[in-house]
């Protein structure tokens, strides 16, 4: 996600469509903002954001080591 608001909006959608919130979004030790949910099939997902993340022209996260 590209902002904390996008993370929060996605969690609202997850709740609306029946996903189970495992951990509400919050600031985390690695400096980002994230939360976890479980989908109806039982899979766990993280939705996250960090101020220092960069995206390419296709909105793909750039991972630079």
Image (cartoon, rainbow, N blue to C red):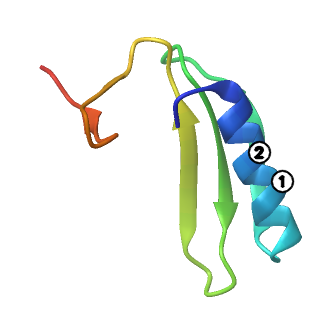
Which quadrant of the rendered structure holds the C terminus? top left
Q: Residue furthest right?
A: 16
**Residue 1: image x %, image y %?**
52, 37
Q: What element carries label 1?
A: helix
Q: How far apart are marks 1 and 2 (CA)?
A: 5 Å
Residue under numbered circle 2: 9
Q: Position of residue 37 (x, y in %)?
A: 68, 60
Residue in the picture at 55% in, 21% down? 32
Vertical placement of residue 32 versus 47, above or below = above
Tell me if residue 11 comes above or below residue 29 in the rendering. Answer: below
Pick out the residue farthest to the bottom: 41
Do the residues under discs 1 and 2 have CB atoms within 8 angstroms?
Answer: yes
On the rendered structure, is 18 left or right of 42? right
In this figure, which residue is indicated by the disc labeled 1? 12
Name the foreground residue: 38 vs 16: 16
The residue positioned 85% from the left and 64% from the top of the image is: 15
């Amino acid at each position: 996600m590209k902002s904390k608001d996008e993370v929060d909006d996605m969690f609202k959608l997850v709740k609306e469509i029946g996903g189970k919130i495992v951990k509400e979004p919050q600031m985390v030790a690695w400096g980002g903002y994230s939360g976890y949910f479980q989908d109806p099939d039982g899979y766990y997902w993280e939705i996250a954001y960090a101020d220092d993340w960069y995206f390419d022209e296709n909105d793909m996260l750039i991972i630079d080591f």
